[in-house]
Image (cartoon, helix red, strand yellow):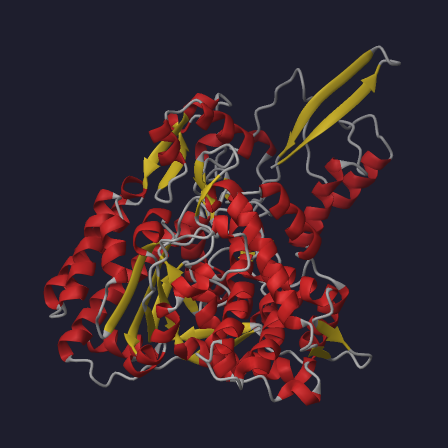
Amino acid sequence: MNCYYCCSVTNDGMFIDNEFDDVYLVTTPDPIPLEAFTLQESEVSAVKYISVEEYKQLLAKQDSLYVPYNVDGPYGQLFDIITKRYQDNTEARSLRLQKKLNRYAPISLTADLTGVTEEDKEVLVLLIQAAKIMDDIFYQQVWYSNLSLREWLNERGQMSELDMLKLKYYLINKSPWCCLDENEAFLTTSDSAMKLLPEATKRVGGWKGFEYRAAFPLSKPPGANFYPPDMDKMEFELWIKGLSEKDKQDATCFFNVIRRNNDSQSNNTSDLRIIPYSIEYSAFLAKAAELLHKAGDLTSSTSLKRLLHSKADAFILNDYYESDIAWMELDSKLDVTIGPYETYEDVLFGYKATFEAFIGIRDDKATTQLKLFGDHLKVLEQNLPMNDMYKSQDVISAPIRVIQLVYNSGGVKGPQTAAFNLPNDERIVKDRGSSMVMLKNISEAKFKLILQPIADLCIIKEQRDLVDFDSFFTHAICHECCHGIGPHTITLSNGHKSTVRLELQELHSALEEAKADIVGLWALNFLIAKDLLPKSLVKSIYVSFLAGCFRSVRFGLEEAHGKGQALQFNWLFEKGAFVLHPDQMFSVDFDKVEGVVESLSREILTIQAKGDKYAARELLGKYGEMTQPLKIALEKLANVQVPVDITPDFPIVTDLLHKK
């Protein structure tokens, strides 16, 4: 449906009609019999079928038999949509989808199961089954018709090559919108499920009734499925002004959705209501809780048992505090992260968390080696490049776990997650700090298949050998560490307590990712200067970071990591720390880069400390753009088809479930 403002002047200027026109485009497999229509005779004298091109020409000629519309105005979008949606041949669509799929390098992820007992494997099976439920919830969170679309595409996936490609690409993006193309729709209503609504028209003999394809919006809904589809920011903000302090907290809470009373479509702001996740997703969460309780009963690991039982309880009670504490204190060969965490899908406000799961095997040797980073968070906080008044005295050492990923699900779509720092709940971060998990086999795959080819194409020969896995992985560790330091709970200029997330709203995710990246780079240099890391890393961390900029920006500027990475690259390039040579290769100016990294770190940290949304918007608006130097690098990578990311399959899961 398209809605636009229309002004029509008739009767020699005696009648001026100002109105909003709604235009509905309905896709049917066969024409609706004309006798099935009920005409409002005061408005419509007759209807007939006509070709799109003929209709457009008649409107352009202002034919008096037809309701007048300006084909050069908003109404003309109708013809553009029809042309794009229906006049594309199957072969061309297949080629385009295959080209999109080629941006992902397929890889089979394995993990060393040495030391994993038969009991652990039984627990793994239950955890994988629970993780699959997180996928179902996530699909529903992204868009209200997502599960039915997935079912439809699954049913048709083997019918043709095009249907198979549509399904494959849909399962990577977990929606009809492409993660790598600024959330542009790669499916149309012509690809969606058929629905029958016989009571919508008059009954006609020999005709089963009105059958149509379920529509979906061309633009990805900014509020995903956390809010009513017709709600905008203004309505929400006006509504919460009239709420009690407790209800305001519930409305902006990670774990509640916003719905309308009785499914009303009224514009009255009072008809909004708050529904806990435990109710909204009750059928899914009850089953997931049952599986986690079974796994908790089965495992002999005390800390894993505590985590699984507390997380199962959280699914039912909608209170995740204790289960997140249990997650931070997990000390088990089997590593489990499951539940609602990241808020990337809520582009409207950045309030609502999506469900996800990461199941892995702890790499004990690598975990021991990384203790240094978690132990020095307090030192890093006290030396951050920002005013001392903004620094926290309560930073807690962060545990870091390195795992080999066995399976992931839920909010992992498009580019794969290689590390994460959780929880995001500011109460826990303030009281207990945060914890990091590094997915080493994911990082190894990304370095080998993506970052190394990027370096070969974009970095000058003299610096190319400085791009290495140790630098790439070490910066990833520091990135996650730096999510745990810097401003979180803040005091505003009026003396009120708040959080960075609440103040920056939809800008928070991109700026936070940029902060973790650039402060992570600053932190590495700080630790090297204190002789806590080898000085051989000094140059390699900067050059590896430069190559990594081109990797992350390819995720798209609608994605938080991509937007944040563009901000960093453009700042460093403008200040001369990154250099573009006449042969279109890039390098790092080692004399400038340290100071420039510190200056951007200070800029972002200060914006967060003040909760300054205006300054955040200005910074992201100026630097979070696709500039010419970035375009030069990305065109080179596209020309030789360097993958943008990986798409893993999990043979261990297949084997475990088959044996079960």
Q: Does residue 239 sit above or below 326 in this rendering?
A: above
Residue drawn at x 46%, y 35% is 228
Hey, which residue is sitting farthest right in the picture? Answer: 12
Q: Does residue 125 sit above or below 42 in this rendering?
A: below
Q: Provide residue 108's location: percent of width, then percent of height.
A: 41, 80
Hey, which residue is sitting farthest top in the picture? Answer: 14
Quadrant where the N terminus lies? top right
485 or 307, which lies in front? 485
Residue drawn at x 54%, y 44% is 610
498 or 26, which lies in front? 498
Q: Does residue 280 sit above or below 605 in this rendering?
A: above
251 or 64, which lies in front? 251
Give the quadrant of residue 117.
Answer: bottom left
318 or 225, which lies in front? 318
Q: Is 8 displayed left or right of 394 in the figure?
A: right
Q: Is 292 displayed left or right of 107 in the figure?
A: left
Q: Provide residue 379's location: percent of width, then percent of height.
A: 42, 65
Q: Is 273 displayed left or right of 461 in the figure?
A: left
